[in-house]
Image (cartoon, rainbow, N blue to C red):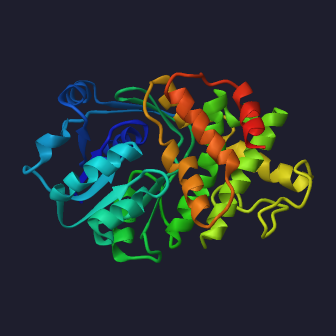
């Protein structure tokens, strides 16, 4: 299966390194020729808790150089969300007749691409890898992780199983028959774990140890879950059950957030994500545009449609934009300010 990975950041680089280490042919597409030259010269290096992986990358070039020159059975789109929307139509010209585009972005990106390009060309993907790009070509993998794929309309298919078997030679690949529920399961955590950690400049374990951090985590998660359920989606289980202990159908916790059942649920999240550096914090550090409008911003947008109040997520969006624009910097004290602004 001829495979092209577009975007060689943290996730794209990790997957590429694993495929090359497994001896699978893979082509890489970069933003510019300078990046491609660097990767051809230095290859890819992936560091984990148990091993170091170093591979060469002979098949890497600037994306536009592939146009009219090659076709692929599978294109893994591993760019940021806003870039994915811009370049995805171009990628259709690189797909073989039965080829599949596999976007790995957060939120509604697969469905937006399906509307533009046709669901028959799109397969949904979710990366559950804890990955960091140290510098171009050098990456860290902080958890075992897996790649979850699925049809946008739900159910299973021959193509999902074919791609699972192909990529499964190098990484853990799983198929979800409720892909929209899987997307929401990750979105719930992105809204709370990732975004709040980026705003605070801390890991989840650090910020939920504070009263403001714990309360804001709960309120952010509860709003997002209320929107998901109101939209008719049943989030899938990932590392925890998506509906926390004490939740009721009105979207209100009916027990003290400090009770032992909720604490145990929260501890499961900490065990899985508590020490990971938030990817959005990496965006802040490198002055890159974040995906906030596809994460908490998506919750706010859908909340207006149903309608479900989302004052906490709206305040979070405003705070992230302020950090992006350089008006404020990541700080734990911002969590308390968000609580005050949304109360």
Specify the quadrant that holds the C terminus.
top right
Q: Quadrant of residue 188?
A: bottom right
Q: Position of residue 298 (x, y in %)?
A: 53, 53
Residue 234, above or below 93? below
Specify the quadrant that holds the N terminus.
bottom left
Considering depth in this image, is 41 or 342 the residue closer to the camera? 342
Q: How many marks?
A: 0
Considering depth in this image, is 252 or 62 the residue closer to the camera? 252
Left or right: residue 144 compared with residue 222: left
Considering depth in this image, is 32 or 131 the residue closer to the camera? 32
**Residue at position x 71%, y 36% from top?**
338
Q: Position of residue 47 (x, y in %)?
A: 47, 31
Mark yes or no: residue 68 visible. Answer: yes
Q: Quadrant of residue 229?
A: bottom right
**Residue at position x 70%, y 29% from top?**
334
Q: Position of residue 8 (x, y in %)?
A: 33, 38
Left or right: residue 28 compared with residue 17: left
Considering depth in this image, is 338 or 20 the residue closer to the camera? 338
Left or right: residue 107 compared with residue 21: right
**Residue at position x 52%, y 42% from top?**
292
Residue 177, above or below 31? below
Q: Position of residue 204 (x, y in %)?
A: 70, 37
Left or right: residue 120 compared with residue 134: left
Residue 200, above or below 271? above
């Amino acid at each position: 299966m001829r495979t092209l990975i577009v975007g060689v950041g943290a996730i794209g680089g990790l997957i590429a390194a694993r495929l090359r280490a497994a001896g699978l042919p893979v082509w890489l597409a970069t933003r510019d020729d300078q990046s491609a030259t660097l990767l051809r010269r230095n290859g890819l290096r992936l560091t984990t808790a148990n091993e170091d992986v170093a591979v060469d990358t002979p098949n890497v070039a600037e994306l536009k150089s592939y146009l009219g020159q090659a076709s692929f059975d599978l294109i893994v789109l591993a760019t940021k969300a806003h870039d994915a929307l811009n370049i995805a139509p171009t990628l259709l010209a690189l797909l073989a007749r039965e080829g599949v585009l596999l976007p790995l972005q957060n939120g509604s990106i697969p469905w937006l691409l399906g509307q533009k390009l046709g669901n028959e060309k799109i397969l949904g993907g979710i990366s559950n890898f804890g990955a960091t790009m140290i510098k171009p070509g050098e990456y860290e993998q902080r958890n075992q992780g897996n790649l979850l794929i699925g049809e946008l309309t739900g159910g299973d298919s021959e193509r999902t199983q074919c791609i699972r078997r192909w990529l499964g030679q190098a990484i853990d690949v799983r198929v979800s028959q409720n892909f929209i529920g899987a997307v929401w399961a990750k979105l719930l955590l992105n809204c709370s774990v990732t975004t709040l950690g980026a705003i605070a400049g801390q890991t989840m374990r650090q910020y939920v140890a504070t009263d403001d951090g714990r309360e804001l985590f709960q309120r952010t998660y509860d709003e997002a879950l209320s929107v998901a359920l109101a939209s008719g989606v049943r989030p899938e289980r990932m590392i925890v059950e998506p509906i926390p202990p004490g939740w009721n159908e009105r979207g209100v916790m009916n027990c003290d957030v400090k009770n032992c059942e909720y604490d145990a649920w929260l501890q499961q999240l900490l065990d899985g994500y508590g020490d990971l550096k938030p990817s959005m914090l990496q965006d802040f550090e490198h002055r890159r545009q974040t995906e906030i409008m596809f994460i908490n911003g998506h919750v706010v947008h859908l909340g207006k449609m149903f309608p479900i109040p989302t004052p906490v997520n709206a305040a979070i969006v405003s705070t992230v934009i302020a950090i992006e624009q350089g008006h404020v910097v990541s700080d734990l004290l911002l969590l308390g300010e968000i609580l005050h602004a949304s109360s």
